[in-house]
Amino acid sequence: MSEQDAIARFVRENVIEPDHIVKTRQHALELGAAPVSAALGAQLAFLAAATAARTIIEIGTGAGVSGLWLLHGAPDATLTTIDSEPEHLAAAREAFHAARIPSTRVRWITGRAADVLPRMNEGAYDLVLVDGDPARVMEDVAHGLRLARPGGTVLVPRVLAGGRVADPVQRDDLTTAYRTLLRETQESSAVVAALAPIGEGLLQLTTVAD
């Protein structure tokens, strides 16, 4: 095992995931909802806390794992979450109810991000999580940056695509889109960008206030 593999394994094995999120993760896997890893979830909670997020929007609810982690870090925040799969949203609702999160703190939207996001208010959110359809990652990130307030944060998990982005042999459309996203955000003067290798990659963008 390489040093990097050993470090990654140590990080994975030393994340303490709250019991209610562990149960939600198990249900998500049963549904095929592909939850974020526990290590990435802990990072989401940290960033929600560090940015003192009060308004959060999540593109891609899944079965609720990422949303629970975000509210774990920002217990006073309100969360708007969007997904096109009614079954996933129903599972997430059950998970949030079991976690005793007040219904007034969560807004559930059933629909395709392409249809919903153009209607959302510009600059209304402290924190935006973009974890929807990978094929729409460029469009969803563009909307996320529009929705984030000046100085707000946009988070994009899974941007290393299971290692494909780092492999120059891989040239499929999705891998190419992720590489383009990483390059353009690193070069942009409108955001401060950082890529963390945790959980298949987490792109972190903070919008530059005018």
Image (spheres, rainbow, N blue to C red):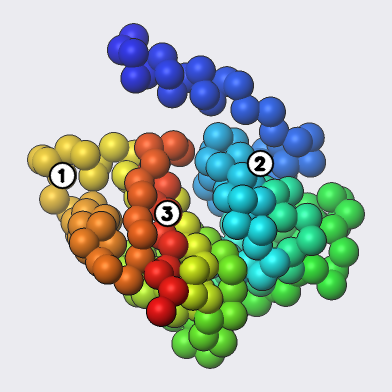
Instruction: Work out which residue is located at the far front of the displayed protein and give it.
Output: 210
Query: Real-space Cα distance between discs 2 and 1?
Result: 30 Å
To which residue does mark 1 refer? Answer: 170
Q: Please name the amino acid that badge 2 sits on.
A: Arg
Q: Is residue 157 above or below residue 136?
A: above
From the top left corner, tell me how far across and down residue 64 is, in percent: 67, 54
Which of the two labelled residues, at mark 2 and mark 1, occupies the earlier sequence position?
A: 2
Residue 25's tag is 2
Residue 144 lies left or right of residue 165; in this view the side is: right
Which of the two labelled residues, at mark 3 and mark 2, occupies the earlier sequence position?
A: 2
- Specify few, some or many for label 2: CA neighbours under 10 Å numbering under 14, 14-19, or 20 or more: many
Q: Please name the amino acid that badge 1 sits on.
A: Gln
To which residue does mark 3 refer? Answer: 204
- Specify few, some or many for label 3: CA neighbours under 10 Å numbering under 14, 14-19, or 20 or more: some
Q: Is residue 14 above or below residue 176?
A: above
**Residue at image x 84%, y 50%?**
99
Q: Are marks 3 and 2 in contact (CB under 8 Å)?
A: no
Q: Please name the amino acid that badge 3 sits on.
A: Gln
| SS of the residue under disc 2 | helix
Which is closer to the viewer, label 3 or label 2?
Answer: 3
Instruction: Work out which residue is located at the far top of the displayed protein and give it.
Output: 1
**Residue at image x 40%, y 70%?**
208
From the top left corner, tell me how far across and down residue 200 is, in percent: 40, 40
Residue 155's tag is none
| SS of the residue under disc 1 | loop
Q: Looking at the rendering, in which quadrant would you find the N terminus? A: top left
